[in-house]
Amino acid sequence: MEPKIKWGIIGPGKIARKFASDLLLFEDAEVTAVASRNLERAKSFASDFGIRYVFGSYEELFESNVVDVVYIATPHTFHKELSVKAIQNGKHVLCEKPLGVNLIEVEEIIKVAKEESVFLMEGLWSRFNPSIQKAKELIDNNEIGPISYLHADFSFYALDRGKESRLLNPELASGSLLDIGIYPVFLSYLLLGMPKKIQAQANFLENGTEAQTSILFKYKNALSMLYSGLKGESKMEAEISGAHGEIFVHPRWHEANGLTLKKGEEVEKYNLPTKGNGFVYEIQEVHKCLKNKLMESKLWSHQNSLDLARLLNDIRHQIGAKFPFES
């Protein structure tokens, strides 16, 4: 029997709880340790998931020898520092998206991972979602012909949250773009690549938080219309239109349970229910990479993370979104 892959959880928040629940579905995984700056919070998390090792600081977990890989689920602003520290202590890293707040941070994390020869992947779970995988397969097989138009949005109401929440506090890299706008940008990049031109507009709150952003990506023969916002809900159905048909990824498309392929009068529905909380497929990819001693995923590579960070940087530059801690 092969040894289990031992996971450490960094930042025991809501997302980490969903992730840890999905880890429990794997026979070859063990949720071994959890770390938080709040020891009582870490103890509560450990009690809920049967975790053996509890640490009151992230550094203590990194310096221990009890885990193989860590899942970093802290606010964006801590991703770079914690990823680098974990890597320098020989730990493999799955870090929640965005991998870094800006391109410079992403470049630094990847550089250190290559130097230390450890596995690193950005936790962009939608890349591994069965519906997204199926949509890409249909497009790669020319089922709808060359793509001419893509529309994707992600929006919900968040202005009633506290000013210190990660979505509304500029010191925590607040705003819609890095938190949820990353998904529409990712989808266009995944299916159409790097655009030739970007146009973006945004509205801001009084404290400087970007509250909604509209983006137009221009390709040689296609256009993508993308939107993210914190001021109200959107439909969240992704539409991909080609010369011979359309694909509709069902709401909420970034975590979809199916899609519809429409070609003229012919309509075919694909029901692709996700397992657990949806992190299962991302975890499977990490396990596959670790067992094959890979330093990065072929499905979401270091270059993919760099490209995505570059697109987000360009959008932020256009709309004038800058955080107080950025020079």
Image (tube, rainbow, N blue to C red):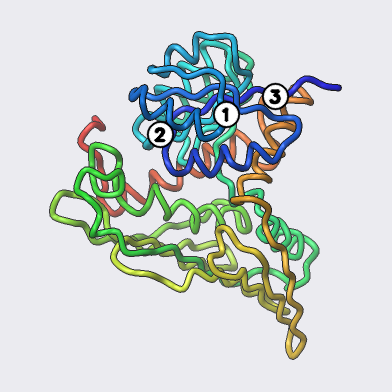
* Camera-side residue of 205 and 105: 205
Cα separation between marks 1 and 2: 21 Å
Please say if the residues under marks 2 and 3 sit with CB atoms less than 8 Å apart: no
Cα separation between marks 1 and 3: 16 Å
In this rendering, the label closer to the viewer, 1 or 2: 1
Circle on res. 74: 2
Q: Tell me the quarter of the picture where residue 90 sits.
A: top right
Q: Residue flagged by tag 1: what amino acid is it?
A: Gly
281 vs 312, left or right, is right
Expressed as whole percent of the image width and height from the top left, the position of residue 289 reads: 73, 30
* Camera-side residue of 192 and 230: 230
In this rendering, the label closer to the viewer, 1 or 3: 1
Mark 1 or mark 3: which comes first in sequence? 3
Q: Which residue in the protein does label 1 denote?
A: 50
116 w.r.t. 258: above or below: above
Cα separation between marks 2 and 3: 22 Å
Expressed as whole percent of the image width and height from the top left, the position of residue 259 reads: 67, 70
Farthest residue to the left: give it: 206
Which quadrant is home to the N terminus? top right
Query: Going 59% across and 33% down the picture, which residue do you hit?
Result: 121
Query: Going 58% across and 58% down the picture, which residue do you hit?
Result: 255
